[in-house]
Amino acid sequence: MTTSIDTIRDDFSFLDEWEDRYRYVIELGEALPEFPDSARTDANKVQGCVSQVWLVTHRENGSDPVIRFQGDSDAHIVRGLVAIMLALFSGRRASEIMSTDAEGTLKSLGLNEHLSPQRANGLRSMVKRIKRDAEAALQPA
């Protein structure tokens, strides 16, 4: 994923209409790297999402490792939301992930008021999973 969360914020600021933002979110999802079929397992599935969402966590070594995520969904808009979460969290240290305010970011993008309750719950489930993996990475071996 090459789009940063700052780029996404900037792009959102230029889009006044929700329909334009919706299309942009879908485009972000389309730009995600290919997700391997072998990673579409129950272990990688994010529980609590109505659509199917898969998330793979790769962590480096160390007491506060950099963590990278790969993700995908079977739904276009949700795939775009996955892309936004990856832009927000992937490539950061575990401690940064733990202190990142995902809800505040979504609010600043105006997404929270345009998501159905099911999608909002799914997004919260994805954030919980990402933070849980970051917390586990911070635990002593």
Image (cartoon, grey):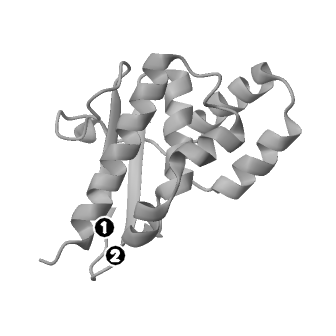
Which secondary structure lies at badge 1? strand
The C terminus lies in quadrant: bottom left
Residue 29 horizontal/vertical position (percent): 57, 35
* Of the pair 130 and 25, the residue shown nearer to us: 130
Q: Quadrant of residue 115?
A: top right
Q: Which mark is residue 59?
A: 1
Determine if residue 18 is in view. Answer: yes
Please state if 25 lies on the left or on the right of 40 as rendered.
right
Label 2 to label 1: alpha-carbon separation: 6 Å
Q: Where does label 2 land, which residue?
A: 65
Q: Which label was assigned to residue 110?
A: none
Structural crowding at the residue carrying mark 2, measured as other residues with C-alpha within 10 Å and reported as few (<14), some (14–19) or many (≥20):
some
Looking at numbered disc 2 in the image, what kind of residue is underneath it? Pro
Please name the amino acid that badge 1 sits on.
Arg
Q: Position of residue 28 (x, y in %)?
A: 63, 38
Q: Nearer the viewer, residue 73 or 13?
A: 13
Mark 2 near mark 1, Cβ–Cβ under 8 Å? Answer: yes
Give residue 73's position: percent from left, percent from top: 41, 29
Query: In the rendering, at what x and y percent does residue 135 appear?
Result: 28, 63
Residue 18: image quadrant is top right
Label 2 vs 1, first from the N-terminus: 1
Q: Is 2 placed above or below 32 here?
A: below
23 vs 7: above or below: above
Q: Kindly identify the residue that appears in the image at 32 percent across and 62 percent down.
A: 134
